[in-house]
Amino acid sequence: MIYFNRITNEYEQSLRDDHYDIDIFIRPLDHWENGVGEIKADIVKEGSSISVNKGNGARRSTGFSLILKDEYIPSKNSYFWYNRKFMIIAEHKAGDNIYRFPLGVFLCSSASELNGRLTLSGADKYANLNGESNVGKVTEPFSTNISAGDIMIGDLIRELLLQDIGNGLPIDPIAPLIDPYFNSCPLYADVTLSIGQYYGELITQLAQMYGADCYYNTNGQLVFRRKPTVDQPYWYMHMGYLWRYKDQDETVISKSQSTTYSLDGINCVTVSTDNSEGTVYSYTARNKNAESPINVKAIGERYPSDPIVYISLGDTSGDSGEEKCRQYAEYLLLQKTRNTISENFSSILIPHFDVDRVIRYKDEDYIIDSLNLDLAGRKMTVGASNVSFLPQNWGLTSYE
């Protein structure tokens, strides 16, 4: 039996024993993301990799090589060309069953030929939103031209993804995964795009305005998900962990594991509204968690190089200006803290891992910040932050 995106006891146990058996293959896709072939034997594993990082926008990138064949050389008759994509899939065999997990859907961003090999680089589909692929540029001013409340955020995002790229094709034909909250959440202010901007810039702006995570998942679907508005780190404690690393699993954790720390120590973030009239609101989020090694009392107040982040005030009939500032400041502080305290260790490649998911490591909960997958060695480097070190307010010891 072949399973897709399914985790079972058989699958998990087989990753821990001596029968670890993972292979990689590539599924070329047309613009509508229908499969048009499969590449397996011609993949040159050495040097092939995938990098994944947390945050909004583009999260994934890849680089790999193929044995040079005519059907791979970029052209209108090739698997790799404008408006075509490819999915990289990890396949694990456990007993009589096969478990497949997509590692991302990518656009071919560059290709080079040398010594009988074709080396390709790929960016995730956000490249069609942020201008990296030169698709989706605004050629005439775009405005919602509405009174506040006339359009729902979810509808606006769907409309932006379906904008014509100039040849009758939409920017992204795949239906996004939008938090139900945004399907009934109205736009609280007119938004516009100028000539030369990209439609995706508006989606990024909406994510900032409304406190949302915005990225493409491993299946190639745009995710627009509301972030928790209170005690964001607490949310991770309720997710349940993807994997529990055990000391006896020598095939799972490399004996040469290492830990690195960034020492910028950002523990304060200030957010302010950008309005020029009326009351200007602001809020400073501080890390006061006594268990965190970079709390304010331990190392003093440390701000990022841009000391104040500005956001639009918009409608305050729901959340007040100060509340909007608080939510975004605490979100930014959480991200800054994760950048500072993230630990890195080596592991076998576990196909279902992704960033912003919880794992159990050293008998504590960690949130995954980054993944670097070595497709040749079937290994990966995991960057993760200890949840108990994050700024939080739900009952862990505070120095106040």
Image (spheres, rainbow, N blue to C red):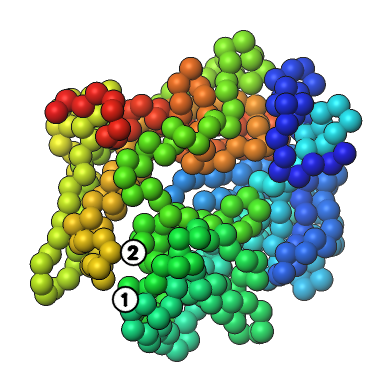
Which numbered disc, 1 or 2, marks the residue that appears first in the sequence?
1
Q: Amino acid at mark 1?
A: Ala
Q: Residue at x 36, y 57 (%)?
A: 211
Which quadrant of the structure image shows residue 337? top left
Q: Amino acid at mark 2?
A: Met
> Left or right of 95: which side holds 126?
left
Discs 1, 2 touching: Cβ within 8 Å: yes
> Left or right of 143: which side holds 243?
right
Q: Residue at x 60, y 37 (%)?
A: 353
In the picture, the quarter occupied by the C terminus is: top left
Which quadrant of the structure image shows residue 11? top right
Mark drawn on residue 189 = 1
Q: What residue sits right under mark 2 in the picture?
A: 209
C-alpha gap between disc 1 and disc 2? 10 Å
Helix or strand or loop: what does disc 2 sit on? helix
Q: Residue at x 37, y 80 (%)?
A: 192
Total marks drawn? 2
